Image (tube, grey):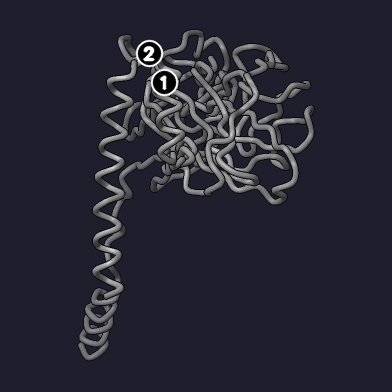
Amino acid sequence: MALSSLSISLLFGLSLFVQPVLAIAPQVSISELGEYVNTNSFELSYSALSDDPGAITAQFYFRKESGSYLAFAPIINGASGQVEVTSSQLNDQDKYFFKVEINGGAGADETSTIYDSGGPGSVQNYWKEKVAPGFYKLHWKNPSDSDSHRVFIYRSDQTSFEADGAHKVGEVGGTPNAEMTWDNSTPDSQKEYYYALRVIDKAGNSSGLVTDAPGTVTTSSVLGAATQANVGSTSEVSQLPKEEVKSDSTDSSTETTTLSPEPTRRVLIPTQVLEKIAGDGKGGLIAAIIGVVLLLASGYYFLFRRKDNS
């Protein structure tokens, strides 16, 4: 009886430490795509969790924004894996959705992106203004593309150069069709500098170059992004009119007004007056009137002079 009571106590004590094993609900996470991609060849991966990792199966699906999901790539076994997205899925420039399901739909996750492989338009109405030695102001209009993102600016003191990271001196944003200006101080005020501009869209595609350099300016890949220019590997160089020096001040908003020279004042003595009038053919009457005026003025001067001396 004592042994039986001890056994019951031991079993009761053990039951306090033994917790029931809870089943893990299947969960899966798909790799996130950026808002835009400019290539139709990339990998998608997943990571999954369940109470039996070895029994996990995963299937990938894709669809266009206006379409229905279609399965692609073979079923994958395991808690993680990846598939290759190709032109068989991304065959139009559109928004695409990708989904992965595990265990026949027990868990799912989704991501999306916009496929855009075309370059944006170039800047318009570009011109360069030399405000002062060593100080330039660039003017242009942004293209009308809704996905245009940044304008990269390159500079060199050579008439021919490459639009690459070594020559990149700035970048600015701006809304489509916006009129833009950009000020730049150069390292050597004794040198002439040349600029090139290109537009980068949200997918990392590049426009053609617009430049004021009289030589050849070639394109280069944009740092951090695979770039496809819409005009090929080398853009046309548009030679612009030579810039004008606006003023000697570095304040580009200050206008300089050129004043006409002040005329030299001439004082004519009485005889010169008479000669001038006579030469103009005014007649003896006018000469007589002026003579009388001069005589009266001389008299007044003589009287006041005497009064002062007295």
Which quadrant of the figure contains the C terminus? bottom left
Looking at the image, which residue is at 39% across and 30% down?
111
Observer able to see residue 97: no
Left-right relation of 304 to 31: left
Above or below 57: residue 93: above
Above or below 160: residue 307: below
Left-right relation of 286 to 267: left
Q: Position of residue 231 (x, y in %)?
A: 63, 11
Which residue corresponds to mark 1? 278
Labels 2 & 1 near each other (Cβ < 8 A): no
Q: Position of residue 13 (x, y in %)?
A: 25, 81
Q: Nearer the viewer, residue 32 or 72?
A: 32
Q: Nearer the viewer, residue 157 or 7?
A: 157
Looking at the image, which residue is at 32% across and 9% down?
67
Which residue corresponds to mark 2? 64
Q: CA distance from mark 2 to mark 1?
A: 99 Å
Looking at the image, which residue is at 40% across and 17% down?
144
Of labels 2 and 1, the one closer to you = 1
Above or below 9: residue 297: above
Which quadrant of the figure contains the N terminus? bottom left
